[in-house]
Image: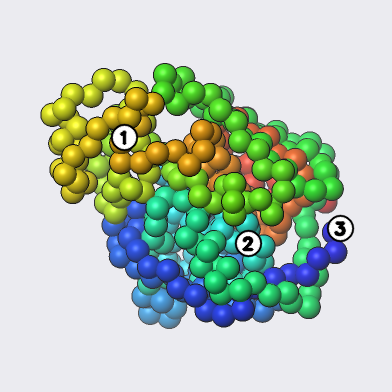
Amino acid sequence: MKLEKQQTIKQDVSISGTGLHTGQKGTLTFHPAPENHGIKFRRVDVDGLPVVDAKVENVVDTSRGTTLAQNGVRVYTVEHILASLRGAGVDNVLIDIDCEEPPIQDGSARNMIEALKTAGIGEQNAEREYLRIKKSLTYFHPKIGCEIVIEPADDFRMEVSVDYNSKVLKPQTAVLENMNDFEKEIAPCRTFVFFQELEMLLNHNLIKGGDLSTAIVFVENFVGEEELQRVAKLFNMESVGVHEGGILNNTTLHFENEPARHKLLDLIGDMTLLGKPILGHVKAFKPGHLANTEFVKLIVENLE
């Protein structure tokens, strides 16, 4: 195993905002935690302050994000927080949350990792343990065509490819060669959605806290002015239009392959549910939260 020290944050730090799916306004407060504590959420809005461990066995829903449940409470949409902690190299932290869902911020992990850096990252005395797999592992989901593979290795690398059979969101790939590059190359990458999905999500009460600044919206087919203005009104904006590149004109891409980078971010977050960092080379095609968490369960069954 690689010999490195476990890490936690040096002081408390908080971020506030609105949850994407529930629309709940809330605050996350990250606290330093002792060695071998791992990552835990504490629902401070509930009597008894129940704790939810960030472990894959506590996953109960993956419909539009990864939801954890334990001790009678849930925490929704945890993947960006977990990715931020892994990207910042934080092994041990207690996260107080005063509602069911963390704030979405701008749809990326940028603000969270900046908050963690503000708190400072400090070494602890105990050694960090890296997980290893015995052999190459493959998860395949035939219905959605997703495949995720991990090969044994002495370092960590991840490659993610997406293909939505879309005229505006072309097939693309993102690669993370070193976790030290996470903050600059992956953390700023925002979630995305197709325009035709917006109404469905609204009708199912899945984006009560969303606005057009929290996601990249790809417009696959022609949308008339009346429909654009209706959506603008739903999201409390004066107007919206469509860029020549096929995205709503309220934003521009940070990277040409930002969607693939965001899927990589999500996969790192979901793999953090292993409880410890893993060594290996991961290659994923069309990953999503269901496939990601099933892949993590497969890894758990095949650890050295």
Residue holding disc 1:
248
Q: Nearer the viewer, mark 3 or mark 2?
A: 2
Residue holding disc 2:
88
Three-letter residue code for mark 2: Ala
Q: Nearer the viewer, mark 1 or mark 3?
A: 1
Residue holding disc 3:
1
Comparing 197 with 235, the one in front is: 235
| Mark 3 closeness class: few <14, some 14–19, many ≥20 residues within 10 Å | few
Q: What whole-number distance in Å separates the C-alpha atoms at marks 1 and 3?
A: 47 Å
Comparing 249 with 62, the one in front is: 249
Q: Quadrant of the N terminus?
A: bottom right
Q: Nearer the viewer, mark 2 or mark 1?
A: 1
Residue at image coords 35%, 36%: 217
| Mark 2 closeness class: few <14, some 14–19, many ≥20 residues within 10 Å | many
Residue at image coords 38%, 44%: 215
Q: Quadrant of residue 64?
A: top left
Q: Earlier in the sequence, mark 2 or mark 1?
A: 2
Residue 287 percent location from the top left of the image: 56, 35
Residue 82 percent location from the top left of the image: 56, 58
Q: What whole-number distance in Å separates the C-alpha atoms at marks 2 and 1?
A: 31 Å
- Image position of 14 with respect to 205: above or below: below
